[in-house]
Amino acid sequence: MELRVRFDRNLYNFHPHEKTTTFFASTCITSNGRFYFSFVSILENAYLTSFRISHHETARQPGSLFNSPDERYNWVEKIKGGFLLHIQRSESLYQEALDVIVGGVNSPSRSFRAVGNGTPIFMKKAQGAYFWDEDGNRYVDYLAAFGPIILGHAHPAVTSAIVEAAANGVLYGTPTEKEIRFAQMLREAIPSMEQIRFVNSGTEAVMTTIRLARAYTGRDKILKFAGCYHGHSDLVLVAAGSGPSTLGIPDSAGIPSSIAREVITVPYNDIQAFEEAIRHWGDQIAGVLVEPLVGNFGIVPPAPDFLEQVNKLAHQAGALVIYDEVITAFRFHYGGIQTLFNIEPDLTALGKIIGGGLPIGAYGGKREIMDKVAPMGPMYQAGTMAGNPLSISAGTACLQTLSHPGVYERLDQMGKTLSKEILSLADQYGINITLNRMGGAFTVYFTGEPVTDYQGAQSADGELFAQFFRHMLAEGVYLAPSKYEAWFLTTAHSDEDIQFTIRAVKRSFKKMKPTKQTGKTK
Ligand SMILES: *Cc1c(COP(=O)(O)O)cnc(C)c1O
């Protein structure tokens, strides 16, 4: 019997020997991060009889795929070590997607670029804490759609709010009472947002706060912190984090250098660098844009007094302080980081959770500043879909559910259990990690060093993360496909899901090469 196997675009022929064990794997990556298997059936004693790369020359002479028995052993161990996932349908969909959708994905962070490339998993259905992919595999979901799905998928309260709203028309182009009630809810939770305007995405919300800060101060420059992600508008894509950093694009193509010149970037949590920048450019800075707790190069809390100093120095220079709470608002408690830490910015941008999974954004702040917004003032901003009944209804239902007692305590408790176990397993299996957690959100960095800024997050081992990610995927746990993202707990996760995940982490760590002395030998 001869077995023909396609590895990525290469065709391999295998010959099974005696003592065969069959392993199936799909879309695999070896530890060097390069080797891909679209569909593999490995026979332990198989050897390669031929090796062809597309339609070109034979790359190696027929014979063993491996140069030595050791090499073969290691390789087979790697295959045995995990990645036992059937995703044939995802793979064929991905090929179709690549043809018609640029890169096969509608947002670059959905691709598997940051975890060694290959087929992203196509999901078919999501319910509660689970995803099911097109091949029928189930995953416990820690992506939560990059943040918004804090109640889990298809939460009944959100679903019925959407259905009910849809029956009454999805878009009016007129004001509605629902928008007032929702804005009141937001202001009650985040009082610095004295006046609010709804938009359709976090990107739009942040972009508009910048325009507003410029309109209000009559200045042009914006100061931001390295690695923070503020959406994809021109100004904030200068040395941005999350998606772009993952892709290794320091700033996007297509952004005029004249715009990049208006942006000053300093390291997060580095108040000295901030002070220097303020000293240098203070009188030209319209706004200081900050994630009051970073969610976009992993979870990184502000150092003690950092936010207070930012406020003080920015205001002394006559600049506005803009909190981008798109990912943090309603994530850790019923409100923002600003209400949790009791510190007020001038303007706030919201998104993600406040839409309950539907597209939304909102910005707001002091009435005196918001008075500059059209039709009250000279700063123009508009939106056909803004404040649409579906998003407003879903958001209202989501926040109402989040306001129930015990919700955030439960998220925090699950986050604590899971992160404690991950740390102890890492110690047991000798994997160097740093875990930053805030409530029900945390990031596992594959580094032994503390992570307090973007540079720290960058230094985490992406290769190890990719391995871990693949192992977890094969175990039925879906993590965000990037070392810069967080795990998000949802109210739908059960104690069994947490235990299931802990077992998956244990098996994954076990398959990885130790990077430090194990706890056992200490
Ligand atoms: C996700 C995010 C954005 C962008 O929001 P979109 O809805 O994706 O446009 C902006 N800022 C922060 C902090 C975010 O996490």
Image (cartoon, rainbow, N blue to C red):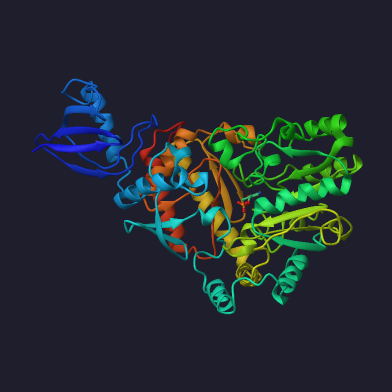
Q: Is residue 245 left or right of residue 386?
A: left
Residue visible at 51% across and 44% down? 108
Point out the image quarter for the N terminus. Answer: top left
Q: Is residue 15 left or right of residue 27?
A: left
Name the residue nearer the viewer: 273 or 515.
273
Q: Tell me: residue 324, above or below residue 404.
A: above
Residue visible at 38% across and 53% down? 476
Which quadrant holds residue 402? bottom right
Name the residue nearer the viewer: 340 or 164.
164
Across and down, in percent, residue 433 comes to 52, 38
Across and down, in percent, residue 171 comes to 62, 70
Inspect this view and state whether residue 325 appears: no
Which quadrant holds residue 13? top left
Q: Is residue 108 left or right of residue 271?
A: left
Residue visible at 60% across and 70% down? 390
Across and down, in percent, residue 124 comes to 39, 60
Q: Tell me: residue 397, above or below residue 411.
A: below
Q: Tell me: residue 184, above or below residue 426.
A: below
Across and down, in percent, residue 393 comes to 62, 72
Residue visible at 43% across and 34% down? 521
